[in-house]
Amino acid sequence: MTAKEYLSFVVEQIHSTVVATVDEKGLPVTCVIDMMYADEKGLYFLTAKGKNFYQRLKSTENLAFSGMKGEDTMKRVAVSVRGKVKEIGSDMLPLLFEKAPYMNEIYPSAESRKALTVFQIFEGSGEWFDLSKKPIERDSFFFGKDADEVSSLFSFFRVFSVSRLICTSSLNCSR
């Protein structure tokens, strides 16, 4: 799958994720955040400007999150992402409310929506684990700036590591 497909899976199949940031002392803090939209430029979510979560995002501009889908461990898919975030304002709010109509119940008026802003995870990396498949499926993905370069480099090192493992475990290995 492509990075966009993994991010779309997060939005469409998982949706609610546990997001980690750090506070002003560098201590970890988590909260549950709904991932609302994905496109070729990244992943989008919203928050209220008055929340501590908003302040942590603005001060560190980084986050990590995990989400999972499945009824038990061996039927579960898990996705973890870490990346850079930026506030992009309220222009995407109508789209996010269209994609997640339940938001109209939480923020029913135009006045209540004035507190909201949208963040974009625009660059990052992720890991995919599908325990429902045998053998277990695992993959890494990258998105944003230089994603193709990083992905190619990662693939090179993965092949290099496997080749080295095979070479070092073989008695007939030429160096």
Image (cartoon, rainbow, N blue to C red):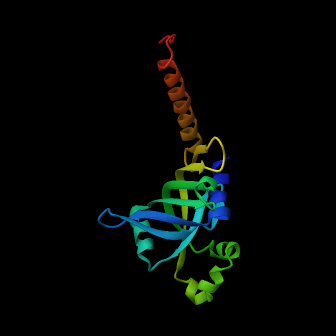
Residue 19 to residue 48: above or below: above
Q: Quadrant of residue 7?
A: bottom right
Residue at point 44%, 80% (across, down): 50
Q: Position of residue 138 (x, y in %)?
A: 59, 44
Q: Position of residue 47 (x, y in %)?
A: 52, 74
Relative horizontal placement of residue 73, taking residue 49 as reference (left or right): right
Q: Position of residue 15 (x, y in %)?
A: 61, 66
Residue at point 44%, 63% (across, down): 20
Residue 159 to residue 168: above or below: below
Q: Quadrant of residue 147?
A: top right
Residue at point 68%, 63% (across, down): 12
Residue 40 to residue 27: above or below: above
Query: Can the viewer see residue 118?
Result: no
Q: Is 150 or 71 nearer to us in this picture?
A: 71
Relative horizontal placement of residue 112, taking residue 26 as reference (left or right): right
Q: Quadrant of residue 75?
A: bottom right
Relative horizontal placement of residue 87, taking residue 37 as reference (left or right): left
Q: Position of residue 108 (x, y in %)?
A: 62, 88
Residue at point 44%, 72% (across, down): 53
Q: Residue furthest left?
A: 25
Q: Is 65 or 156 nearer to us in this picture?
A: 65
